[in-house]
Image (spheres, rainbow, N blue to C red):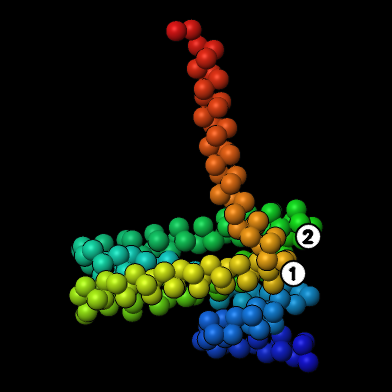
Amino acid sequence: MAATAEMNARACGYLDLLYAVLFHPVRTFKELTGETEPDNRLLLYALFSVILVSAIAPVIRFINVGGQPVNLLLFMPLSALIGSLVWLLSGLVVAMLSYAFTEQTRFRTILTLSGFATLPWVFMGPISLLKVGLGAVGVVLCALFGLSVWLWSVLLFALAIAVTYAMTAERVLIVLVMPFVMTLIFIGWIFGFFGNISNLVPH
């Protein structure tokens, strides 16, 4: 029965998968995380999700602050490229950190699920229009809905880690927090290094 459900999830179209991820994420992620890694079609669906969400970002900025529409021809592809690189890098970082806990990388799986975890951001386009149509009330609603979308996406990303590596909530939290901690430590090392070098230079 579980194998049949997994096969159905892998065989459904993109729009069906989009709906399933947004409104039935736990069941969908579990069905997509079988003994084998997701196939090429699912990985391409995840990449398309990241590109779609990233390309929408300049449009949202244009709605919020204005600008020249022609600039979107440059910023949309650029945003899509940067978003894809960030997606690959974040997947690699999570895979490496998770290996320390589970001795499994499952890079393809975490890439696929984390790509789908960005899907709530597609709602930011319609949400941004509230500012235009409702004035001050729209600004408040846009902020509240924007916060909800951010939280929704973070929870989906955490769920992607938990399901991919069968982790507890505590370990998922460690994986989520560790990159920020390591960044602070790295910055501290850099300042410490240059501080020690400066002490060696004659004044």
Image x and y of residue 98, in percent: 71, 58
Q: Is residue 115 visible to us here? A: no
Label 2's element? Answer: helix
Q: Residue at x 50, y 62 (%)?
A: 84
Q: Residue at x 32, y 75 (%)?
A: 141
Q: Is residue 97 left or right of residue 18?
A: right
Of callouts 1 and 2, the N-terminal one: 2
Image x and y of residue 167, in percent: 73, 66
Q: Is residue 172 visible to us here? A: yes
Front residue of this view, candidates 161 and 35: 161
Label 1's element? Answer: loop
Q: Amino acid at mark 2?
A: Thr
**Number of residues whose C-alpha sits closer than 10 Å to that of mark 1, classed few (under 14), some (14–19) or many (20 or more):** few
Q: Is residue 108 left or right of residue 53?
A: right
Q: Are the residues at dot 1 and dot 2 in contact (C-beta closer than 8 Å)?
A: yes
Residue at far top of view: 202
Q: Which residue is mark 2?
A: 102
Q: Which residue is mark 1?
A: 166
Label 1, label 2: how far apart the Cα atoms are: 9 Å
Residue 192 lies, with reference to residue 120, above or below; the image says: above
Front residue of this view, candidates 186 and 52: 186
Residue 26 lies, with reference to residue 56, above or below; the image says: below
Q: Amino acid at mark 1?
A: Ala
Residue 48 lies, with reference to residue 174, above or below; the image says: below
Image x and y of residue 118, in percent: 50, 70
Q: Quadrant of residue 77?
A: bottom left
Q: Residue at x 68, y 58 (%)?
A: 95
Residue 31 lies, with reference to residue 77, above or below; the image says: below
